[in-house]
Image (cartoon, grey):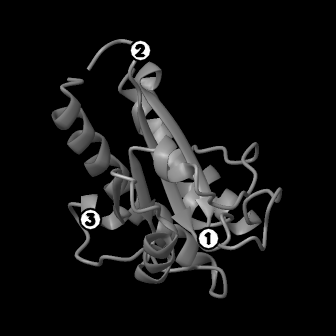
Amino acid sequence: MTKTEKVSVLFCCMGNICRSPTAEIVFRHFVEKAGLQDHFIIDSAGTHDYHIGDAPDKRSQHAAKQRGYDMSSLRGRKVDLNDFTRFDYVLAMDEANLSILQRLRPHNAHNHLGLFLDFATRYDEREVPDPYYGGNDGFERVVNMVEDAAEGLLNHICKEKNLV
């Protein structure tokens, strides 16, 4: 990998106000902690247009803030077709959103499209549950799961791209 090449990662959920912005900010933190921020482009998006331009859900922000992550500057956006060529990894939070992304993905796209939790090492689940209609404990659980998968994803990319 050359100095000018960057690995690009896009996290996706339904509305881009809970799970995917949490994944974006946590993964960004792990990348910065490793001193690799110059090697990555990190973003998040939703498969639906419900919350374009909105800040992350206050409960997501609170759960993240409790762990030292500040999501206040993030804003919701919808996945677009260019994302499938701009991002090396497009990672869905659950099977339903992965299915939508698979239908949207152009046939000539060759990026990694899969589930984010496939990179987790401490969770057997394959999906990050949507906490939107539940209580605050659901948002805490999302942060726990995302931290695990973010660490696993960074380790995977570092090995694959010889970054460490």
Residue extending furthest toward the right = 53
Sequence order check, earlier mark of 3 and 2: 2
Measured from the top left, where is residue 10 in percent x and y? 50, 50
Q: Please give the name of the residue rendered at 26% of the width and 20% of the height, measured from the top-left corner.
A: 1
Measured from the top left, where is residue 27 in percent x and y? 45, 44
CA gap, disc 3 and disc 1: 19 Å
**Residue 15 disc label:** none
Q: In the drawing, does residue 114 fall left or right of residue 65?
A: left
The vertical placement of 36 against 96, above or below, is above
Q: Which residue is mark 1?
A: 47
Measured from the top left, where is residue 115 in percent x and y? 35, 67
**Nearer to us in this view, 163 or 140:** 163
Q: Which residue is mark 3?
A: 118
Residue extending furthest toward the bottom = 133
Name the front one of labels 3 and 2. 2
Quarter in which the C terminus is drawn: top left
Measured from the top left, where is residue 76 in percent x and y? 73, 57
Q: Which residue is mark 2?
A: 4
